Structures are given as structure tokens and as C-alpha cells.
């Protein structure tokens, strides 16, 4: 993955499990310094295959959003309380609608 941060183009390897990429705020580092992912711009994901020609293929470009986890937890709890749902399947269905 590549992205711009303070007018510099940075690249990093995205962790994966099987065919699933794990993109979370913890992967944003440059020179062992943590980067605020909300300050990174123009994310680009490339597929790299050293046996192919060309070796890189652009897969996607995007700007991810990482919400404040504490605020998200508070808002989620308010929603759960308001819906008064105790059945996990019904709760999950309602949460996915949002």
C-alpha cells in the first residue's frame, strides 16, 4: 500500500490473513514513527507479484476513515440501550442497518 503523508509518498506492506487484508490504524508508521492515519491521503493498494510483468498491479485507491473507538463504543451502547434488544442476532441485524 502506498499513501501521501506530509507531501511524502510512503509505502508499507499490509498484513493479511488468507485473502483478507487487515487495514487498521496500527499499520501506519514511517521510520518507526507512528502516523495519524487521518493525516494520510490517497491510499493506493497494489498487488505485487515478482514473477509477473509488470510486477505491480494497482487494485484500489481510497481514503479510509478510522473513527474514534471510544466515541464509537459510546454511540453503539446508546443504540443498543435504545433498541432494547437482547437477542444477539436481532441486535446484529439492526447494527448492520446503520
Image (cartoon, grey):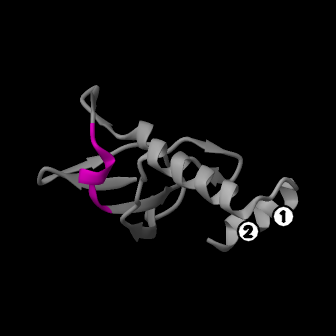
Q: CA distance from mark 1 to mark 2?
A: 6 Å
For the point 76% across and 59% down, the residue is: 84
57 in relation to 34, above or below: below
Location of mark 1 (residue): 90
91 in relation to 29, above or below: below
Q: Position of residue 94 (x, y in %)?
A: 73, 68
23 in relation to 97, above or below: above
Q: Can I make out residue 50 in this image?
A: no
Quarter occupied by residue 98:
bottom right
- Tell me the tag on residue 10: none
- Tell me the tag on residue 94: 2
Q: Around disc 2, counting alpha carbons within 10 Å, would you say few (fewer than 14), some (14 to 19), or many (20 or more)?
A: some
Q: Position of residue 10 (x, y in %)?
A: 26, 47
For the point 69% across and 56% down, the residue is: 80
Helix, strand or loop status at disc 2 = helix
Closer to us: 92 or 7:
92
Quarter occupied by residue 3:
bottom left
For the point 13% across and 50% down, the residue is: 6
Judge from the rendering whether residue 43 lies leftward or rightward of residue 31; answer left or right: right
Seen as rendered, the residue at the extreme top is: 32
Q: Can I make out residue 6 in this image?
A: yes
Q: Residue 37 lies in magenta, yes or no? A: yes
Which region is colored magenta?
A: 35-42
Q: Residue 32 lies in magenta, yes or no? A: no
Closer to us: 51 or 2:
2
Judge from the rendering whether residue 82 lies leftward or rightward of residue 85; answer left or right: left
Helix, strand or loop status at disc 1 = helix
Residues under numbered marks 1 and 2 in contact, where contact means CB atoms less than 8 Å apart: yes
30 in relation to 64, above or below: above
Q: Position of residue 74 (x, y in %)?
A: 52, 47
For the point 50% across and 51% down, the residue is: 72
Counting the numbered discs, the total is 2
Amino acid at each position: 500500500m502506498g499513501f501521501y503523508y506530509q507531501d511524502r509518498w510512503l509505502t508499507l506492506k499490509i498484513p493479511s490473513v488468507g485473502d483478507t487484508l487487515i487495514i487498521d490504524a496500527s499499520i501506519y508508521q514511517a521510520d518507526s514513527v507512528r502516523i495519524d492515519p487521518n493525516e494520510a491521503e490517497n491510499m493506493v493498494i497494489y498487488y505485487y507479484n515478482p514473477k509477473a510483468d509488470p510486477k505491480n498491479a494497482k487494485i484500489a485507491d481510497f481514503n479510509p476513515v478510522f473513527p474514534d473507538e471510544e466515541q464509537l463504543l459510546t454511540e453503539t451502547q446508546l443504540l443498543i440501550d435504545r433498541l432494547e434488544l437482547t437477542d444477539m442476532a436481532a441486535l446484529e441485524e439492526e447494527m448492520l442497518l446503520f
